[in-house]
Amino acid sequence: MQSTAYPDPTREKLVEAAIPHVVFDGWGAETFQAAVADSGISAQMARVAAPRGSVDLAAAYHKGGDRAMQVAVQAADMSGLRYSEKIAHCVWLRIQAVDREVVRRGMSLFSLPIYAPEGVRLVWETSDAIWQVLGDTSDDVNWYTKRATLSGVFTSTVLFWLGDDSEAFKDTKEFLDRRIEDVMSIEKAKAGLRDNKAAAALFALPNALFGLIKAPAGAGRTDVPGTKTGDPS
């Protein structure tokens, strides 16, 4: 599995060469063959870097968007933003990091049953990348719920963006803000239940069980192979 932190140089060169062809031919065999020809990489080396052809290139393109988002967030001044606004801004920067038509073609690829599980994993990794750059330190069940919730927000926002014809994607920005506010409203409701003595007693057992759930070993570290960003393969 390719890591977000350690992109393969050969694969990245193939991705760059593939992009002009994706708009017309999608992430298919023809695009992979064109990328090999245009990049000057031998067919043998190309197959080593991307055994599944364009599928691996599409996944690499997605991961490249995650890296670009993290760089953009680190360079941005978000000191004056509320936490919900920081989350929305990260999602927006992630969307801006990629080409809409290339993403549209990728959605078509990863909606196929054989590749759908990988598409879900890639979105999860994007959500994880956003929480990482925001400094999330959760190590319990919240580690999972945060990423699951943000995955839903990200996916719905991308789908809206793909069909948005408003100027500067104004409608997408407003849609994203509404989704984030919906999530924050749920979190406020959960906090209210925790502060309610009757509700706290009712959920004592479920909360105790949830307390046993921990984030994956090595979560939050970049030096541990096989975790979030630490797989150099």
Image: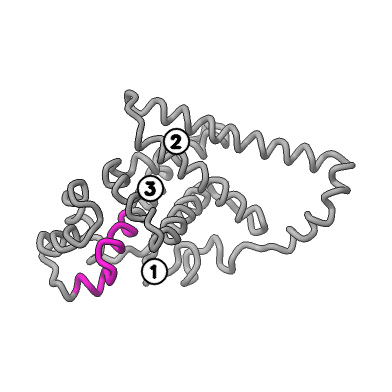
Tell me the SS state at disc 1: loop
Circle 2 residue: 77
| Residue located at (42% from left, 43% from top) | 73
Res. 71 mark: 3
Give the answer, above or below, for where 70 lies relative to 36. Answer: above
**Whole-Å distance between the Cαs marked 1 and 3?**
22 Å
Which amino acid, by three-letter code, is at mark 3?
Val
Tell me the SS state at disc 3: helix
Residue 3 position by quadrant: bottom left
The numbered mark, 1 or 3, whose residue comes first in the sequence reads: 1
| Main SS of residues in magenta | helix
Q: Position of residue 103 (x, y in %)?
A: 32, 46
Q: Position of residue 99 (x, y in %)?
A: 28, 43
User: Viewer-nearest of labels 1 and 2?
Assistant: 1
In magenta, the rendered stretch is 45-61
| Residue located at (42% from left, 61% from top) | 118
Res. 177 mark: none
Q: Position of residue 110 (x, y in %)?
A: 37, 55
Circle 1 residue: 1
Residue 202 horizontal side relative to residue 7, left or right? right
Which amino acid, by three-letter code, is at mark 2?
Asp
Front-most of 120 and 60?
Answer: 120
The numbered mark, 2 or 3, whose residue comes first in the sequence reads: 3
Which amino acid, by three-letter code, is at mark 1?
Met
Residue 194 horizontal side relative to residue 95, left or right? right
Give the answer, above or below, for where 208 lies relative to 44. Answer: above
User: Viewer-nearest of labels 1 and 3?
Assistant: 1
Quarter of the picture containing the C terminus is bottom left
